[in-house]
Amino acid sequence: MRTRAPGGKKNEVTIRKLLAATALTVALTETYRRCWREPVLSWGATREEATRGLPGDALDYGTQLAFPSFMYPEEADRFVPGTDAAHLGGDVWVADAAMAMMENEPWSGMFVTLGG
């Protein structure tokens, strides 16, 4: 007589669903990277704007290959200060822009979203 662990059949179904969901996630991620990422990032830009590089584009901070960060890899200095002291990015840029607006306009407060 064969015995099975409690919930044995149910566990097999759960594992199959998990594997199917993982495969679907990987497939959708790859489809996004190959087909949609570039048009989404360059929507509304001229051809020159869409193809020109930014300082620090080669810096990916280890996010190009890691899962799940490869879906939205860190590129250039969008979320980090970066390496160019004359053009700081990330939260530093956002804070500087907010302060400049408050100095030039009659602002008493401002809601600022920091990406990093």
Image: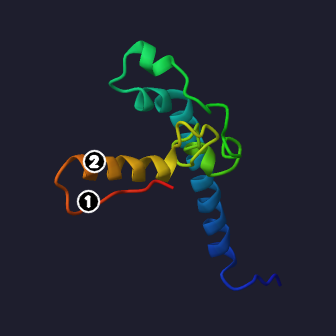
Q: Residue at x 66, y 73 (%)?
A: 11
Secondary structure category for the residue under label 2: helix
The answer to whether the residue labelled 2 contacts the one labelled 1, judged by CB atoms less than 8 Å apart, is yes
Q: Which residue is mark 1?
A: 110
Residue density around tag 1, few if under 14, some if 14–19, many if 20 or more, within 10 Å: few
Most distant residue in the right direction: 1
Q: Residue at x 26, y 59 (%)?
A: 110
Q: Which residue is mark 2?
A: 101
Give the x, y percent position of residue 56.
Answer: 62, 33
Q: Amino acid type of disc 2?
A: Met
Give the quarter of the image for residue 106.
Answer: bottom left
Q: Residue at x 51, y 19 (%)?
A: 52
Q: Is residue 72 left or right of residue 83?
A: left
The span from disc 2 to disc 1 (Cα, nearest Å) is: 9 Å
Q: Amino acid type of disc 1?
A: Met
Tell me which numbered mark, 2 or 1, is placed earlier along the sequence. 2
Residue density around tag 2, few if under 14, some if 14–19, many if 20 or more, within 10 Å: few
Give the x, y percent position of residue 85.
Answer: 59, 40
